[in-house]
Amino acid sequence: MNKKASLIIKTLVFLAILFTCFFGVTLLVERKSSFNKNQVFFEEAKKDHIDAFLLGSSHVINGVNPLQLFEEHGYTAYNLGGYGSVLLSSYWQMMLALDYCTPDLVVVDSYMLENDVRYIDDPNANVSSDELHLNIDRFPLSKTKYHAINDMFQNRDEKYPYFADFIVYHDRWKELGAEDFKRFTKDADVNRMMGAVMEYGTHSAEYSYVDYGAGFLEQETVGTTYLRRIIEECQSRNIQVVVVTLPFLAMYENQAAAHTATQIAAEYGVPSLNMLEIPGLIDINTDMEDPGHLNVLGCQKITACLGNFIAENCPLTDHREDSGYDNWNGYLGDFNAELAAKCEGNDDLYTQLMMLQLNSSDRTYSVSIRGASSVYADATLLRQLHSLGATEKLDQAAAAKCSYMLISDHGVITDFAGDSDQEFYIDTADGLFSYSPASDIYRVLYINGDTENNFLYSDDHAYADVQLLFFSNGVCTNHQYYTSDHFTYDYDQR
């Protein structure tokens, strides 16, 4: 071999090693949020196991649970929603995903349809670069990604970090942790909710939803243009489309946008579902993390509604009994186990009561409120208790500021209001309860005649405003105390 050929080979080997090292370093320092959210998409798309794409903003990420769709209908959907996504970025998110699989259905949320800002890097777009990186970093550079970035960005300098995100992340070596290296060992922590993210909080404000009687948007916008492009692209590929508007505290223009989305869907002959106009679908004061985002309780209601709508209008294949879908069944089992674990031990009282609404039919628990407690002025707390099944006796207790007791026996509710020496007996699946509301501070709860153990009194927690107790086989398995300070609740447990 002559020297020239040897030099060429050595150069090529060196370049190959250099490229491999550079590629490895790029993956190492890259922020892992996009990998975590979208990695399972690539795994399931490769197996052709995704029958539906869910497109939209954080409303969709927090509002539609693909695992619930699988549990209730056997549908396999992936939540491709992106934080801050407008219809422009949702369109390109769909196009990037279509390079890897072709679904039978695309569900697109119309939120921000009124947005008329053409480019993502326009300051008026109000979209952060971090949010868009979350959407697309995991998708390798391709012809589609090249076109997506050129279409979404006007400023050339803004495009470069999306073509080569090493420009953004090259100095992350200062903050590297164990999770960064797990991408190479294939045991990285990834989103096993098929792209969705559940919120487990609830706001404490009071909102009233107002129907403004809005008509339609007065003119075409960038949002309407890209909704049309999504529908037209899907129809050109024989993909079904459903246009939805998920619930939130919508203002006049938001409501006009929802009506316009329905109108556009009708033009193309595709089904639409405006959930803003379904009375009683959610309670905006208990089912939301904040005025714009559903919590896990609201998500369950919305996902059930969407699943039923799909089943009636464009049913998909039921894969629950199909072989090869072990990941879906496994992730669903993990999610249900997580919900069960969160049903007890929450230091936030609102979250605790929300979780009981979501998952309490298989247990016995009681809620006791001390007489003269300030919590009777907490409208959010009272509303949550009514959602759990509290009767008008709760309102009587609030009006009189006397003791209140609710006992839930696997979903069967019994409640009491008042302070007296009278003794009440409640036969439950987990023991015979004896309750006596003797006074504001001193209430009595015995189980199975054991008068040595009063579960409602403790010197250390005599002035706790709310007590929540869980029972099994005649034993109190968990006792949680909440003490109010202007509706901020201090928590203790034994």
Image (cartoon, helix red, strand yellow):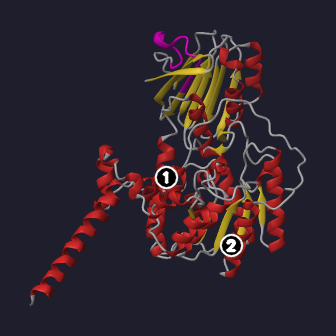
Q: Is residue 29 left or right of residue 54?
A: left
Give the extent of the magenta segment: 455-468
Q: Secondary structure at mark 1?
A: helix
Frontmost residue, 166 versus 230: 166
Give the CA distance from mark 1 to mark 2: 24 Å
Residue 127 visible to an observer of this rendering: yes
Q: Residue 335 bears which disc, if any?
A: 1
Q: Earlier in the sequence, mark 1 or mark 2?
A: 2
Image quarter (top left, top right, bottom left or bottom right) of the N terminus: bottom left
| Number of other residues with Cα within 10 Å of mark 2, as a class: few under 14, some 14 to 19, many 20 or more | some
The image shows residue 220 at horizontal and vertical percentages of 81, 62
The image shows residue 202 at horizontal and vertical percentages of 62, 36
Q: Residue 315 bears which disc, if any?
A: 2
Q: Is residue 368 left or right of residue 389?
A: left
Residue 381 on the magenta segment: no
When the figure is inspected, residue 78 is found, relative to residue 467, above or below; the finding is below
Q: Residue 215 bears which disc, if any?
A: none
Frontmost residue, 136 versus 402: 136
At horizontal 66% and vertical 41% (from top left) the residue drawn is 288
Residue 457 on the magenta segment: yes
Choose top left, top right, bottom left or bottom right for residue 456.
top right
Q: Secondary structure at mark 2?
A: loop
Frontmost residue, 337 versus 55: 55
At horizontal 46% and vertical 11% (from top left) the residue drawn is 460
When the figure is inspected, residue 234 is found, relative to residue 406, above or below; the finding is below
Q: Amino acid at mark 1?
A: Phe
Choose top left, top right, bottom left or bottom right for residue 269.
bottom right
Q: Amino acid at mark 2?
A: Pro
At horizontal 76% and vertical 48% (from top left) the residue drawn is 281
